[in-house]
Amino acid sequence: MSSIEAYDDRERIKKYDADMEVMHPNRGKMAEVALDFLAAFKEAPSQVLDLGCGSGFVAERLLDRFANVQINCLDGAQNILDLAAMRLKSHADHLTYTCSDFRTLNTLPLKEKSFDAVMSSYALHHLSADEKVQVLRDCLDLLKPGGFFLNADLIKNPSPAFECCIQDLRVKGILQRAAPDDDRFASKEGTQAYLTKMESAEGDQPLDIEEDLALFRRAGFFPVSVLWLEYREAVICAQKPALQD
């Protein structure tokens, strides 16, 4: 099963947002960090690409923050795009939906230098390093000079010992937040087994923070910086050089 197939599974997406609150409680904080920075750094964006929009969580917060923004919500899974459309139906005139694999961005009828920002949340870690660089290069082409890529995503720790400790803390937190009747998270061993199976099925390939920063620079972004980091999650901001042709 690929990550696209996983997020096209109707049973999986029924509990997607609830699961995210259990497994990734910093999701809201990460979105706010990215949006606070975007709002502080430049005038309100008019065109934003939400890359891997999922259920519309980030798009909803974008619309709350920037009343006139137009968002292209792109995801490879049609069923989760439908979920986003339901969530955001009161903002329909501000939204366009595109069902496409990230890796085919350069084949889509998207105009170069047309977006003020690209935002992505819990999405790019499904790609290999080489695939990620190509997607970042495609996004660089789509951004206006001076535009931003704000990426809130999973990372791994470069130290195996530290990563093991962080994983233990992660499982402990999930056990505390999960519903008592959720059999997936009934024990430490069961929770770890579920996470391992899920991540393998979805092809998760998180990099450490320095590797991720290097990929953004390799793709042509500068400057590139970490805005926020906690354990296995980070928010990266990367800018397209203002004078790039």
Image (cartoon, rainbow, N blue to C red):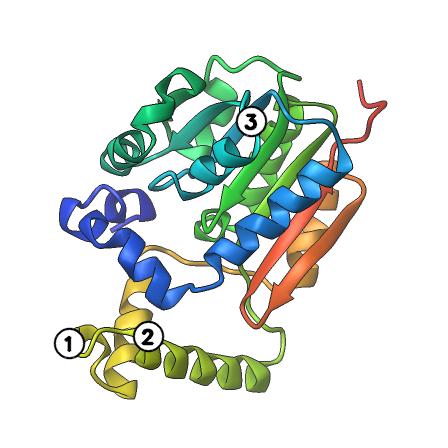
Q: CA distance from mark 3 to mark 1?
A: 39 Å
On the rendered structure, is 218 left or right of 208?
right
Q: Quadrant of residue 197?
A: bottom left
Q: CA distance from mark 2 to mark 1?
A: 13 Å
Q: Position of residue 74 (x, y in %)?
A: 41, 30
On the rendered structure, is 190 left or right of 244?
left
Q: Identity of the amino acid at label 3?
A: Val
SS at mark 3 in the image: strand
Taking 64 as reference, is 190 above or below it? Answer: below
Q: Residues within 10 Å of mark 3 (few under 14, many from 20)?
A: many
The residue that label 3 is drawn on is 48
Q: Position of residue 236 (x, y in %)?
A: 66, 51
The residue that label 1 is drawn on is 183
Q: CA distance from mark 2 to mark 3?
A: 33 Å
Q: Residues within 10 Å of mark 1 (few under 14, many from 20)?
A: few
**Total numbered labels placed on residues in the image:** 3
* Outermost residue, right side: 243
In the foreground, 35 or 231: 35
SS at mark 1 in the image: helix
Taking 183 as reference, is 37 above or below it? Answer: above
Q: Identity of the amino acid at label 2?
A: Arg
The residue that label 2 is drawn on is 177
Which dot, 2 or 1, sits closer to the camera?
Answer: 2
Going from N to C along the chain, the mark reached first, 2 or 3, is 3
SS at mark 2 in the image: helix
Classify the position of the C terminus by image quarter. Answer: top right
